[in-house]
Image (spheres, helix red, strand yellow):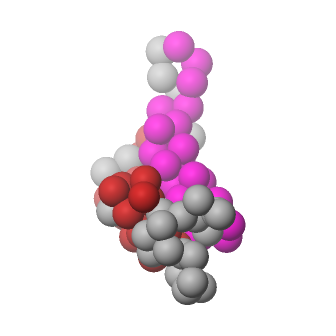
Amino acid sequence: MPLLLIIGLRTKIAAMIIAFTMVMAVTLVYSHQIFTLNEFGGWLIELNAFFFFGAIGLIFTGGGKYAVSNSNRWD
């Protein structure tokens, strides 16, 4: 899936799969750590949230004008 995002092919579908994966990862593994901080004061699931919100942004914006295929609504 990350390769599809890099080249811009079916960007919105790949982003939906990544967002779903991050929701499931946080739900199944990190559910007890959602509101905790690490030893440096950062959010413990910050990396997972970064991938989730990045994927959500790509779902709404798409691949952009440099995508490999932009003839479809899923790009």
Magenta highlight: main SS: helix
Quarter of the figure with the N terminus? bottom left
Percent x, y for residue 52? 52, 55
Q: Residue at x 55, y 86 (%)?
A: 72
Going by the image, does 38 lie left or right of 25? right
Inspect the magenta stretch and tell me whether residue 57 lies in it.
yes
Nearest the eye: 33 or 45: 45
Quarter of the figure with the C terminus? bottom right
Res 51 visible: yes
Residue found farthest to the top: 40
Q: Residue at x 43, y 53 (%)?
A: 6
Nearest the eye: 71 or 75: 71
Res 15 visible: no
Percent x, y for residue 58? 59, 62
Q: Is residue 48 above or below residue 67?
A: above
Residue extent of the magenta highlight: 40-61
Percent x, y for residue 61? 68, 66
Quarter residue 20 falls in: bottom left
Q: Residue at x 50, y 74 (%)?
A: 69
